[in-house]
Image (cartoon, helix red, strand yellow):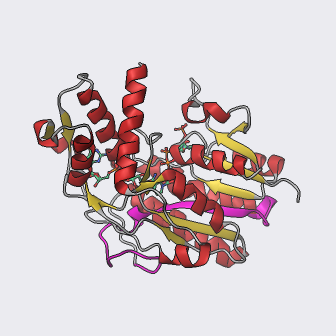
């Protein structure tokens, strides 16, 4: 069989780096789209940089998307690029809409006009469930986003469904619940906590300032979740899937597991700071991944505790290395 070409937008992000590794292991030709920056930011892909092809493009720029699809003629496109941090979406709502919502249409337009047999994956999010209308959340649960990010992802989800139905594109929306790893951005709560735990353990920090400890999330491991993205594009028909662990934990439990792992008590270090509260919160997320289990054969392999321990270990190693 001839080698397949996959285009990943957002290859420099957490998921992009794991997906690129996975696709290389499946013998794909991997093309990664990156936006122009004044300094190169390839930390997460430096170990595979000589195995992937990097091309410049931007979700804000229609012609760059058209040129890339025309030149590389991808068999599969994984649209992972986005402004993905919820608090930034409150401070930069218009930009978030441009990247995270309209960016999806720009890439779908490029595919529709230039290579309509390309299979397309859209990185949708459990943030679309927001103020949840059903517990647990599944593919049919009504959407009620609670941030400009969540609203933008609802647009991205529905435009993907719409292009599938209107133009018969093979376009899937993966509704992924929070997934983390040692490569997670430091501003997200899991990595903020594990990094601080490692620094406190090593005597480099004393205090950790946090927001709402009662929020609950369904946290999984990013390495498991990128496998599900690929599986969605290997089916007979395109469809949408919830990817989650089916377990929920509070931010307080995250603190307990991370601090306890190194023999510390979070109450000795954590200070609540209103600055980290959001204008509107998503209180509870818990996904029902049974459709993905049944139809894709997907299941998560890393537990919550294993994930937190893996992240603390990685932070300790990195900090000790200096
Ligand atoms: P991430 O680490 O924040 O990575 C985002 C990527 O998007 C980066 O490579 C970034 O490039 C790129 N990007 C941002 N704006 C761009 C633009 N205008 N043009 C081109 N590239 C742009 O996010 P992630 O955690 O890997 O998540 C991947 C996707 O899944 C995102 O769409 C996110 O919203 C979605 N998602 C994530 C989760 C999760 O829990 N991780 C759950 C559900 C959905 P730079 O390196 O240049 O910044
Ligand atoms: O917050 C609470 C915060 O920023 C989780 C993105 O990948 O997952 C992510 O979005 C919870 C929230 O992720 C702090 O209020 C408390 O309730 O790690 P987070 P998120 O907002 O759930 C979804 C699925 C995505 O799609 C997004 O792209 O933790 N929390 N104290 C805090 N959060 C942060 N960041 N910092 C705190 O100090």
- The residue depicted at 71 percent of the width and 46 percent of the height is 24
Asked if 242 appears above or below 83 in the picture, the reply is below
Residue extending farthest right: 2
In-image side of 150 versus 6 (left or right): left
Q: Tell whether position 113 is magenta.
A: yes
- The residue depicted at 64 percent of the width and 65 percent of the height is 231
Residue 95 place in picture, x, y as percent: 46, 46
Image quarter hosting the N terminus:
bottom right
Residue extending farthest top: 322
Total numbered labels placed on residues in the image:
0
- Nearer the observer, 90 or 202: 202
In-image side of 68 versus 247 (left or right): right
In-image side of 213 versus 243 (left or right): left
- Nearer the observer, 204 or 44: 204
- Residue 92 seen: yes
Residue 180 place in picture, x, y as percent: 43, 49
- The residue depicted at 35 percent of the width and 75 percent of the height is 136
- The residue depicted at 49 percent of the width and 59 percent of the height is 301
Residue 255 place in picture, x, y as percent: 23, 46
- Residue 188 seen: no
Asked if 12 appears above or below 205 in the picture, the reply is below
In-image side of 302 versus 258 (left or right): right
Q: Quadrant of residue 229?
A: bottom right
Image quarter hosting the C terminus:
top left
Q: Which residues are magenta?
A: 112-141
Q: Quadrant of residue 274?
A: top left
Residue 232 place in picture, x, y as percent: 63, 67
Q: Tell whether position 205 is magenta.
A: no
């Amino acid at each position: 069989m001839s080698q397949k070409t996959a285009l990943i937008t957002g290859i420099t992000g957490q998921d992009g780096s794991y997906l690129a590794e996975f696709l290389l292991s499946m013998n794909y030709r991997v093309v990664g789209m990156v936006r122009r920056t004044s300094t190169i930011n390839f930390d997460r892909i430096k170990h595979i940089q000589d195995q992937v092809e990097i091309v410049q493009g931007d979700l804000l720029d229609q012609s760059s998307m058209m040129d890339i699809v025309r030149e590389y003629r991808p068999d599969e496109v994984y649209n992972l690029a986005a402004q993905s941090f919820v608090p930034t979406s409150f401070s930069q709502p218009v930009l978030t809409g441009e990247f995270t919502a309209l960016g999806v249409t720009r890439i779908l337009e490029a595919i529709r006009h230039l290579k309509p047999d390309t299979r397309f994956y859209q990185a949708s999010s459990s943030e679309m469930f927001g103020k949840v209308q059903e517990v647990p959340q599944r593919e049919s649960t009504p959407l009620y986003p609670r941030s400009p990010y969540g609203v933008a992802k609802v647009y991205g989800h529905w435009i993907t469904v719409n292009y599938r139905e209107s133009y018969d594109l093979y376009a899937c929306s993966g509704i992924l619940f929070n997934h983390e790893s040692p490569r997670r951005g430091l501003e997200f709560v899991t990595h903020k906590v594990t990094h601080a735990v490692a620094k406190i353990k090593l005597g480099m920090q004393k205090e950790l300032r946090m927001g709402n400890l009662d929020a609950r999330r369904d946290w999984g491991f990013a390495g498991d979740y990128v496998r599900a993205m690929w599986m969605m594009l290997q089916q007979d028909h395109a469809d949408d899937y919830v990817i989650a662990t089916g377990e929920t934990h509070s931010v307080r439990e995250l603190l307990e597991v991370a601090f306890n792992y190194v023999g510390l008590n979070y109450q000795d270090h954590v200070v609540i700071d209103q600055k980290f509260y959001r204008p509107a919160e998503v209180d509870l997320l818990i996904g029902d991944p049974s459709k993905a289990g049944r139809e894709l054969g997907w299941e998560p392999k890393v537990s919550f505790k294993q994930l937190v321990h893996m992240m603390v270990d990685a932070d300790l190693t990195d900090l000790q290395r200096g």
